[in-house]
């Protein structure tokens, strides 16, 4: 039977919580001071310490130093408010989670259900690190470059905590794979992981999809609908392309992060959100704030622990490894084993890879189909200007000093579109954004009267 130590100087609150913890199958000891907590930890090593910050003989954070000598003990903070400073401090000291006073039974049950020995989490991370050294992959993430090793270290550091993660990087770099890896190394891994592309949901439906709605709350709402927060309860919600979320909805998302509660559309009943949130964007967050795409307060609340994914062109040494991995997958699926000629792999490492890992996967699949024999040679690969090539064919635009970032973004987007012959897929890949994001921008520019954007976005509408 797992053992919990509750450290809280509020006697009545501690007694009530101890009873609730005992009802969940734990043995419980209580302490009203740091001194008593240290004595209890010496008597019996706890699996879980629920620690109030404000104690009569000091700050509860001091107990973290004592817990470092107990490898199978995890600490959950109990605080009166979930501030950003508290989150960061808890992360640095190694807290697994934190509860906000007054603590509800559902919140407490959620934390207790996720109690996992820190040694077990370290073992899981160790297995992935072993796979990295032997085969070149960290779970589903491939690459041994220094840039990716830094990403793996960050994943291991943050996965076992409850803090929010903000992943940045160009489209196609693998942000969703990083989010899923964080989930699989966390205490929530037995619960759902849900990935949502905010740019792929109609602005009219996104609030209902995220928070759910009640029957009759709007035209067409003929039944109650559970949103992403309820469907992912206990697990991890990954919000990709967060800058495509309408600003009024960003306000509501911020409230969920600050209070841990939300309401379905058309309801007055408050629901608790027991969800680990991970967000991502292919934009520079500060530029997104400056251009009005992301609320500044939401950015800082999401950006507790940032992870930046490097573009594939900045880790060219990983290209042969990743390409070979994709080829092995395709060969197994198609039933015919093929391999790369050395010169073909060397050539792949020279490409610009504006679409990053996603583009590489597509190129490998095409090369597999093009190869008539069992070896993929140069002739099977598409023509592409090497990453270290010259400046032939490049175009330039002039940006007036004092232009807003939104105006710069508009000029670069439209100029790139024209330079690439209004080819939507190439434009999106070159800009490092998804086709849906490009479509949203063109719709916005068309609404402002731009004829080129209107013609291209109109063509996109007709193709749907």
Image (tube, rainbow, N blue to C red):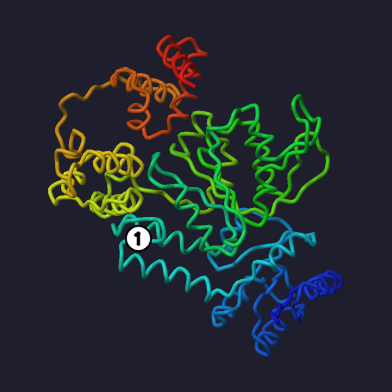
User: Label 1's element?
Assistant: strand
Tell me if residue 145 comes above or below residue 385 in the rendering: below
Q: Position of residue 368 (x, y in %)?
A: 25, 43
Using a 10 Å C-alpha cutoff, classify the residue at mark 1 as few (fewer than 14 neighbours), some (14 to 19) or many (20 or more): many
Q: Is residue 415 left or right of residue 378?
A: right
User: Which residue reaches farthest right?
Assistant: 12
- In x, y percent, where is residue 95? 59, 67
Q: Quadrant of residue 372?
A: top left
Above or below for 98 versus 317: below
Residue sitting at 41 percent across and 66 percent down? 128
Q: Nearer the viewer, residue 122 or 189?
A: 189
Q: Looking at this rendering, what residue extends furthest in the left direction?
A: 343
Quadrant in the rendering for residue 11: bottom right
Q: Residue at x 78, y 35 (%)?
A: 223
Would residue 403 appear left or right of 84 to someone viewing this image?
A: left
> 8 and 223: which one is in front?
223
Q: Relative to 7, say whether 150 is above or below.
A: above
Q: Where does label 1 land, which residue?
A: 137
Residue 205 horizontal/vertical position (percent) = 65, 30
Residue furthest bottom as drawn: 43
Point out residue 380 in the picture as x, y percentages from the top left corner. 18, 39
At horizontal 17% and vertical 39% (from top left) the residue drawn is: 388
Nearer to me, 239 or 372 = 372
Q: Quadrant of the N terminus?
A: bottom right
Circle count = 1
Front position in the image: 380 or 178: 380
């Amino acid at each position: 039977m797992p053992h919990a130590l509750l450290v809280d100087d509020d006697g009545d609150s501690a007694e009530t919580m101890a009873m609730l913890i005992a009802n969940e199958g734990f043995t419980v000891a209580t302490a009203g001071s740091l001194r008593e907590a240290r004595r209890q930890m010496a008597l019996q090593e706890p699996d879980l310490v629920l620690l109030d910050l404000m104690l009569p003989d000091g700050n509860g954070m001091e107990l973290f130093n004592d817990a470092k000598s107990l490898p199978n003990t995890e600490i959950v903070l109990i605080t009166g408010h979930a501030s950003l400073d508290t989150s960061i401090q808890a992360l640095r000291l190694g807290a697994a989670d934190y509860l906000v006073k007054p603590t509800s039974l559902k919140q407490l049950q959620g934390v207790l259900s996720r109690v996992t020995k820190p040694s077990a989490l370290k073992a899981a991370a160790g297995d992935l690190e072993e796979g990295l050294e032997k085969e070149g992959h960290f779970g589903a993430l491939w690459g041994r470059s220094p840039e990716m090793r830094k990403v793996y270290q960050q994943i291991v550091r943050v996965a076992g905590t409850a803090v929010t993660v903000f992943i940045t990087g160009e489209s196609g770099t693998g942000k969703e794979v990083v989010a899923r890896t964080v989930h699989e190394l966390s205490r929530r891994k037995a619960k759902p992981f849900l990935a949502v592309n905010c740019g792929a949901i109609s602005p009219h439906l996104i609030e209902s999809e995220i928070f759910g709605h009640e029957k009759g709350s709007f035209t067409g709402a003929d039944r109650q609908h559970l949103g992403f927060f309820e469907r992912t309860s206990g697990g991890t919600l990954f919000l990709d392309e967060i800058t495509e979320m309408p600003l009024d909805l960003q306000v509501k998302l911020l409230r969920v992060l600050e209070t841990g509660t939300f309401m379905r559309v058309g309801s007055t009943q408050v629901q608790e959100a027991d969800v680990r949130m991970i967000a991502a964007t292919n934009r520079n967050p500060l530029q997104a704030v400056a251009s009005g795409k992301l609320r500044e307060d939401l950015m800082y609340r999401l950006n507790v622990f940032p992870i930046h994914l490097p573009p594939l062109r900045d880790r060219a040494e990983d290209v042969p490894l990743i390409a070979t991995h994709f080829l092995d997958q395709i060969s197994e699926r198609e039933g015919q084993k093929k391999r790369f000629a050395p010169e073909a792999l060397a050539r792949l490492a020279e490409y610009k890879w504006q679409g990053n890992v996603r583009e590489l996967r597509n190129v490998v699949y095409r090369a597999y189909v093009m190869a008539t024999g069992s070896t993929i040679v140069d002739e099977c690969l598409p023509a592409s200007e090497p990453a270290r090539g010259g400046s032939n064919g490049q175009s330039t635009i002039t940006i007036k000093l004092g232009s807003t970032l939104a105006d710069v973004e508009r000029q670069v987007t439209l100029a790139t579109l024209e330079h690439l012959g209004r080819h939507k897929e190439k434009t999106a890949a070159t800009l490092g954004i998804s086709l849906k994001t490009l479509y949203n921008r063109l719709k916005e520019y068309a609404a402002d009267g731009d004829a080129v954007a209107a013609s291209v976005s109109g063509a996109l509408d007709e193709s749907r």
